[in-house]
Image: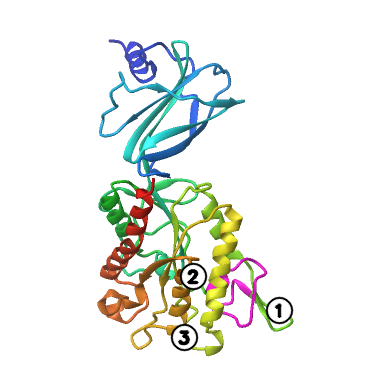
Amino acid sequence: MNPVSRLFRIARVLFVPWFGVSAWAGSMVLTSPIDYQVAQRNSVEGGSVPVTGTLAEGVPGDGILEVRVTRGGIAGSDGDGWRALPFEKSGNAFKAGLRLPSGGWYRLEIRIRAGNVEAGGAVVEHLGMGEVFVVAGQSNSANHGEEKQRTSTGLASTFDGARWRPADDPQPGASGGGGSFLPPFGDAMAERLGVPIGFLACGIGATSVREWLPAGATFPNPPTIERRVRALPDGQWESLGEAYSGFLVRLRQPGVRGFRAVLWHQGESDANQRDSSRTLSGALYRASLERVIRDSRAAVGWEVPWFVAQVSYHVPGDEASADIRAAQASLWKDGIALEGPDSDALTGLLRERGGQGVHFSGPGLREHAARWVDKVAPWLEGRLRVP
């Protein structure tokens, strides 16, 4: 076979569908879903994922959009697995909604055809319908652990604002370059629930709750780090809103009800500061975090569930602030937030530098993850049982 004939034969294998020659091969750009994306399910059975993209100029407007979803190479019982998907088209853009059962990873194939001619197609190799969490707070919610963690199941995924990838540390969107509790938490939740787990992380090391307040919110005394706050002429201080605005970006990225809950782990930078004038009282901690919760819910337009951990540990000998812990617990008792784990109880070799630091060691990150599972999984299983 001469070289020209060989190239022509390869081209036919790559671009010719079984029903005819494509005049617009490669003319579809799929913007949603994307590889390793986890969509938030709305029931134990499953949920819907938006399907959006664009078609090149000249693609017929009366084409039929078809999808095939497979898992482990199995396409389902209807013929070869392809089925029509109703869609809307505006100019070159198209959109649809695809219902998927809980689980993953799925392989999604999509194509559009006019008559017996394919007019573009795309493939997503890993697509999950499961549970998504936003993780916020300070360093122990971010990438400041002593040992980077990796997903062992391959069913935990993380989003950087533009793309999804396996949730190996460090987590995109959060400060630090070390380890987090997210990979082992994701693995344990995936094994328990049988679905992929997705994360949007935005924790910032060493932040006070005062720094997470909306811009213009005032308070009487500054945090230890003043970069995200400023002094006012009357002696008060106000938040610049930097952390809050970034937090809202993360909350909005998945869309309304596009994630299950916020996991909040913060409090060390408000408790027992060396300069006591920088310490936040429990009453002001409670008022500040309640404002962040209520204002952010209003800003995104839905009642986002929040888990609030008990967090105030520094080092051996300064292992808890009763005032901050009581403030955090009061949010659960008053129904504003849900009960997170007591991470102050993780001491000794579960902390970095042989137990001398504030951040978690490798074993500490895994134990921290297990304690988050103990709080989140039973609550979620209860919600999923509700008709």
> Which residue occupies the foreground of this view, 277 or 342?
342
* Count of numbered circles in the view: 3
Residue type, mark 1 in image? Leu
Disc assigned to residue 232: 1
Q: CA–CA distance between discs 2 and 3?
A: 25 Å
Q: Quadrant of the N terminus?
A: top left
Q: Residues within 10 Å of mark 3 (few under 14, many from 20)?
A: many
Q: Residue at x 38, y 11 (%)?
A: 19
Q: Which residues are magenta?
A: 209-229
Residue 212 inside the magenta-drawn segment = yes
Whole-percent x and y of residue 228? 59, 71
- Horizontal placement of 20 versus 365: left or right? right
> Does the image show residue 354?
yes
Amino acid at circle 3:
Asn
Mark 2, residues whose alpha carbon is within 10 Å: few (<14), some, or many (≥20)?
Answer: few
| Mark 2, residue position | 334
- Please give the residue where the numbered disc 3 appears in the rendered image: 272
Front residue of 312 and 193:
193
Q: Amino acid at mark 2?
A: Asp
Q: Earlier in the sequence, mark 2 or mark 3?
A: 3
Residue 254: numbered disc: none
Residue 200 visible (yes or no): no
Are the residues flagged by discs 1 and 3 in contact, CB closer than 8 Å? no
Residue drawn at x 69%, y 84% as measured from the top left: 235
Considering only order in the chain, which callout, 1 or 2, is on the residue closer to the N terminus? 1
